[in-house]
């Protein structure tokens, strides 16, 4: 009996070793994913560490076929920023909750000060961009600027995939771009 067990263990060991070398058993078949518009962005936080020397000069948004886009214009290269889903957007400095409409909220932080114009000092939760007619965006709210950190609350329809990145220009400036997809899956699919 003991010999039989040892033989089976040896055979199993050889099969497993062969499978590991060829990758036939260990690797799972590739899932057939159907991401919306080919987007594979996800919904986890995105960021770049550090502080920036510039100032926020404008906040604007646009509609695209597969996503809505938020753009923060900065007058110098932006090196420090973060974008993440949060349960509540809070005001810089005070920690007071900023009311942001939508089924989910993105906290968009640019580690820069702000150009002191009336357009930015609309008060906590003040609307920065008119999002009527947008498929995904519900609200772009001012959350304040304190000690070189500026926060915008972005209300979206639901927790959807997003990407965030910085583009150089125009001139010596830069732009923090936040794209939020309209859907997770292509129409008619559930596996994305």
Image: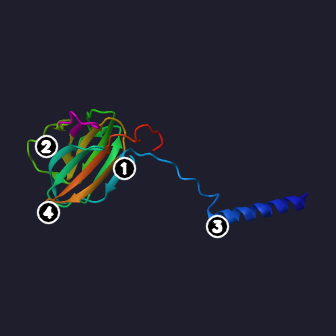
Q: Disc 1 or 3, which lies upstream in sequence? A: 3
Q: Residue at x 74, y 65 (%)?
A: 14
Queried whether the magenta region covers residue 28, the answer comes back as: no
Q: Badge 3: how crowded within 10 Å, few (<14), some, or many (20+)?
A: few
Residue 36 drawn at (x, y percent): 38, 44
How far apart are the alpha carbons under marks 1 and 3? 36 Å
Q: Secondary structure at mark 2?
A: loop
Which mark, by number, is residue 120? 2
At label 1, counting other C-alpha atoms closer than 10 Å, the crowd grade (few under 14, some 14-19, many 20 or more) is some
Which image quarter is the N terminus in?
Answer: bottom right
- Between the residue at mark 2 and the residue at mark 4, the CA separation in whole angstroms equals 22 Å
| Cα distance between the residues tagged 1 and 2 | 25 Å
Mark sitting earlier along the chain (2/4): 2
Left or right relative to 190: residue 129: left
Q: Local crowd at mark 2 within 10 Å, few (<14), some, or many (≥20)?
A: many
Asked if the residue at tag 3 contacts the one at tag 1, i.e. Cβ–Cβ closer than 8 Å, the answer is: no
Query: Judging from the image, what secondary structure is the residue with disc 1 in?
Result: loop
* The label number, if any, that marks residue 135 in the structure image: none
Residue 143 figure quarter: top left
Q: Nearer the viewer, residue 99 or 70?
A: 70
Circle 4 Cα neighbour tier, 10 Å, few/some/many (<14 / 14–19 / ≥20)? few
Q: CA distance from mark 3 to mark 4?
A: 53 Å
Question: Circle 3 sits on which residue?
Answer: 21
- Please name the residue that numbered disc 1 is placed on: 45
State the residue position of label 4. Answer: 172
How far separated are the C-alphas under marks 2 and 3? Answer: 60 Å
Q: In the figure, residue 168 lies in which quadrant?
A: bottom left
Residue located 84% across and 62% down the image: 7
Q: Does the segment drawn in magenta span residue 135?
A: yes
Name the N-terminal-most of marks 3 and 4.
3
Q: Which residues are magenta?
A: 130-141
């Amino acid at each position: 009996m003991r010999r039989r067990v040892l033989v089976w263990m040896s055979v199993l060991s050889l099969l497993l070793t062969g499978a590991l070398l060829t990758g036939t058993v260990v690797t799972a078949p590739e899932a057939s994913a159907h991401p919306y518009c080919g987007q594979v962005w996800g919904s986890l936080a995105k960021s770049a560490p550090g502080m920036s020397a510039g100032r926020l000069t404008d906040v604007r948004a646009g509609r695209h076929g597969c996503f809505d886009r938020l753009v923060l214009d900065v007058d110098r290269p932006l090196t420090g920023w973060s974008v993440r889903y949060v349960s509540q957007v809070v005001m810089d400095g005070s920690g007071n909750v900023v009311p942001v409409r939508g089924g989910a909220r993105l906290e968009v932080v640019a580690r820069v000060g702000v150009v002191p114009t009336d357009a930015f000092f609309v008060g906590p939760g003040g609307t920065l961009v008119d999002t009527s007619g947008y498929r995904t965006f519900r609200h772009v709210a001012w959350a304040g600027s304190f000690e070189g950190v500026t926060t915008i609350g972005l209300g979206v329809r639901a927790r959807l995939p997003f990407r965030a990145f910085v583009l150089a220009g125009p001139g010596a400036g830069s732009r923090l771009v936040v794209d939020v997809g309209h859907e997770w899956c292509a129409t008619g699919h559930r596996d994305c």
